[in-house]
Image (tube, rainbow, N blue to C red):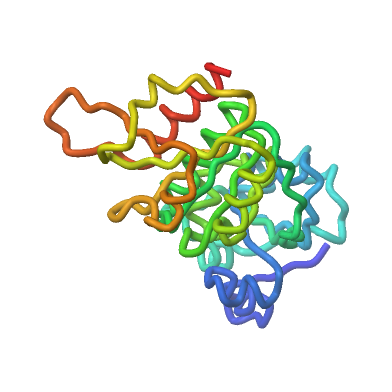
Amino acid sequence: MKEILSTKNTMVKELKKLHKKKYREEKRQYMIEGFHLIEEAVKAGAEIDWILFNQRGKTEWTDWLEQQPDELLIYVSEEVLVSLSELPTPQGLIAIVKMPDDEKKIEFTGGWLLLDNVQDPGNVGTMIRTADAAGLSGVILGEGSSDIFSTKVLRAMQGSNYHLPVIRKPLAGIIAGFKESKVPVYGTELNREAVSYQKITNSKDYALIMGNEGQGVASEFLAMTDQNIYIPIKGAAESLNVAIAAGILMYHLENNN
């Protein structure tokens, strides 16, 4: 088993770069932290390059670590693990994972969540996790949306990216594909043409577009939808958080088909 005890180690310096999107895409690798996420990745058959653990990780997850291939395991010092971690209190385990091929074929069946320029990592991760919980077929991230391989998005997803397809594609062509397949596409906007989501009785197949936290769904995409919908607000709040709104709409559409 390999050991790394110094933060000046060349491999440690290279792994730190994975906190930047540019380097992740260049190396086709990303970093996950904590036992739960790493276990989810292993269960899903994700290609693991290395599993780094310190004394805490060894103590708490000895049995699990012993089941992993020895060539993947690297024992690191507390200082090394802290230098790589983005958590306030590191859990003692970090894995380096190969990025999957993003060229997945999209089946225009079931429920799909489309994200247009949703920039907050917590919102993106939460919506993907909710889509997983609600039983959607997949999530498509349009241009401008937060990178799912950032540490914050990965933590918010809690492993849901291993349970359903999460694909990055320009939305214009995707929306056109749903419409060609006779699948209704719903945008989210408050205007005269929009209707309350409660009036929508959906088929088992649909696409739901959620937009940027401040600007909403782009007008070009709203013009392509079959119907734009909104959530009535009864109190004094001006609007709902986009992840909360997405959860309400996804569960409604899934339970009314």
- Horizontal and vertical percent for residue 245? 37, 34
- Horizontal and vertical percent for residue 117? 43, 58
> Residue 205 sits in which quadrant?
top right
Q: Nearer the viewer, residue 54 or 181?
A: 181
Residue sitting at x 84%, y 48%: 68
Taking the image as shown, residue 218 lies to the left or right of residue 161, namely: left
Q: How many numbered callouts?
A: 0
Taking the image as shown, residue 248 lies to the left or right of residue 65, namely: left
Res. 54 visible in picture: no
Location of the N terminus by quadrant is bottom right
Location of the C terminus by quadrant is top right
Residue sitting at x 56%, y 26%: 134
Residue sitting at x 34%, y 51%: 216
- Horizontal and vertical percent for residue 242? 36, 42
- Horizontal and vertical percent for residue 208? 50, 39
> Residue 7 sits in which quadrant?
bottom right
Q: Nearer the viewer, residue 121 or 179?
A: 179
Res. 213 visible in picture: yes
Q: Nearer the viewer, residue 107 or 43?
A: 107
Q: Taking 230 as reference, is 147 above or below it?
A: below
Q: Taking 98 as reference, is 158 above or below it?
A: above
Residue sitting at x 69%, y 70%: 4
Taking the image as shown, residue 212 lies to the left or right of residue 13, namely: left
Name the outermost residue toward the top: 256
